[in-house]
Image: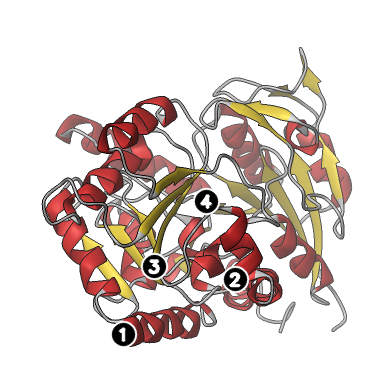
């Protein structure tokens, strides 16, 4: 290939999920990638208000691809609508002679600055966002306003990168034509999580023993922020319903991984049962999680207004059954009802309890569901992201420049 497409990517900060994908894009022979970050706060230990604790990622976030952190007035350690107050992007786009600017999200003022600057310089613009019609509760007035917003947005944007079916439907609802939508799915590093899950298989009994879990009892797992939106309390109430008389301890264990402002209330409710089968394990980092995924038999994400739910991708790489609410965005793409798990009505704890029972009632059925999860997720990864991104680039520029 004689030339490369010069691709700039505007992102708020380094993200653990995106780093491995960016390394793969940077290695593509037809793409010359530069990532522009508005902030680098995530490269060091930082306080996450939803986890309610300091976080320091244990995976590399900026290795393997070219990047720059844009300068900011007043510092760049806080991400809000207005902050960081960045500058310098226009000059960098002009000096870099970029063909395409890929913007992640459109809900910050600087995203619009990037879009407008790019269009003024004749640079094509791609947008990627994970919004769905279920990810936020909107009134009719707000939806009408959003339609006007998209009428403006599609004038300045040449292509929209959909992360899944519900996100594609969202764009369509707001008037974006199918020809301008390209599937670049929300994915995780499947190879990493599969390898880590395999490594965890040998010392699995050591982990079980360290947690004080009896062999032979199934394990239900939740991992995420213990916040109101994640609705871990719904899972706890559904678990209590697994007891035939609400007094006898259920056979399965229930493990919660994560921190957040709901933890104390959840622990208090769990304490009311008097059972030893409910355990809170705190925050676990990226390299630690696969062992817990491998340890469990079923993973539950009962969230409301959840745009995607990447933890479901992660646990499917461990070959485990999954249960999600109907307000989790990945459901239509990754959870096949009755095959690798179940989708239940958000907030309906009785329905959730029934789904858990169906998964765990037959050990062989549960194992086969896990195998199906692994088959599904193997076809939903970074390879599909690269393919979708290439199609978008071809569409907005010229078919002679790539492929």
Mark-to-mark CA distance, 2 and 3? 35 Å
Please report contact status of discs 1 and 4: CB closer than 8 Å, yes or no. no
238 w.r.t. 80: above or below = below
Residue of label 4: 157
**Badge 2 or badge 3: first in the primary sequence:** 3
Secondary structure of the residue carrying tag 4 is loop
Drawn side of residue 23 relative to residue 355, left or right: right
N-terminal-most mark, 1 or 4:
4
Q: Which residue is drawn at 35% across and 42% down?
A: 232
Q: Which of marks 2 and 1 is in front?
A: 1
State which quadrant residue 400 falls in.
bottom right
x then y, percent, for residue 386: 65, 73
- From the image, tell me which residue sits under label 1: 365
Q: In which quarter of the image is the C terminus?
A: bottom right
Q: Is residue 202 left or right of residue 352?
A: right
How far apart in space, not on screen, are marks 4 and 3 (Cα)?
A: 49 Å
| Residue behind mark 2 | 385
């Amino acid at each position: 290939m004689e030339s490369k497409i010069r691709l700039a990517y505007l992102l708020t900060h380094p993200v653990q999920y995106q780093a491995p994908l960016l390394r793969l894009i940077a290695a593509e022979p037809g793409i010359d990638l530069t990532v522009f970050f508005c902030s680098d706060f995530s490269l060091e230990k930082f306080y996450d208000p939803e986890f309610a604790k300091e976080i320091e990622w244990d995976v590399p976030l900026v290795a393997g691809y070219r990047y720059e952190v844009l300068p900011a007035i007043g510092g760049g350690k806080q991400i809000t609508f207005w902050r960081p107050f960045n500058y310098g992007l226009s000059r960098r786009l002009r000096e870099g002679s970029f063909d395409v600017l890929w913007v992640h999200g459109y809900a910050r003022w600087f995203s619009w600055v990037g879009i407008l600057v790019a269009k003024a310089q004749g640079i094509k613009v791609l947008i990627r966002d994970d919004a769905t019609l279920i990810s936020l509760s909107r009134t009719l007035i707000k939806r009408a306003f959003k339609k006007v917003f998209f009428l403006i947005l599609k004038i300045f944007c040449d292509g929209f990168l959909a992360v899944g079916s519900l996100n594609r439907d969202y764009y369509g609802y707001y008037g974006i034509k199918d020809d301008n939508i390209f599937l670049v799915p929300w994915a995780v590093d499947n190879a990493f999580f599969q390898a880590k899950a395999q490594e965890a298989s040998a010392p699995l009994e050591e982990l079980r023993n360290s947690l004080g879990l009896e062999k032979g009892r199934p394990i239900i797992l939740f991992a995420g922020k213990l916040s109101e939106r994640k609705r871990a309390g719904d899972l706890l109430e559904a678990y209590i319903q697994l007891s035939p008389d609400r007094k006898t301890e259920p056979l399965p264990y229930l493990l919660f991984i994560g921190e957040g402002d709901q933890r104390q209330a959840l622990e208090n409710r769990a304490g009311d049962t008097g059972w030893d089968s409910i355990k809170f394990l705190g925050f676990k980092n990226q390299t630690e999680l696969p062992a817990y995924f491998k340890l469990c038999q079923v993973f539950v994400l009962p969230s409301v207004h959840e745009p995607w739910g990447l933890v479901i991708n992660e646990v499917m790489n461990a070959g485990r059954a999954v249960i999600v609410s109907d307000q989790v965005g990945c459901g239509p793409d990754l959870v096949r009802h009755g095959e690798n798990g179940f989708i239940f009505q958000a907030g309906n704890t009785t329905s959730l309890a029934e789904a858990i029972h169906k998964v765990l009632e037959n050990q062989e059925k549960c194992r086969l569901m896990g195998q199906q999860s692994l088959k599904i997720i193997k076809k939903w990864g970074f390879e599909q992201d690269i393919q979708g991104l290439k199609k978008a680039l071809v569409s907005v520029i010229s078919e002679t420049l790539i492929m």
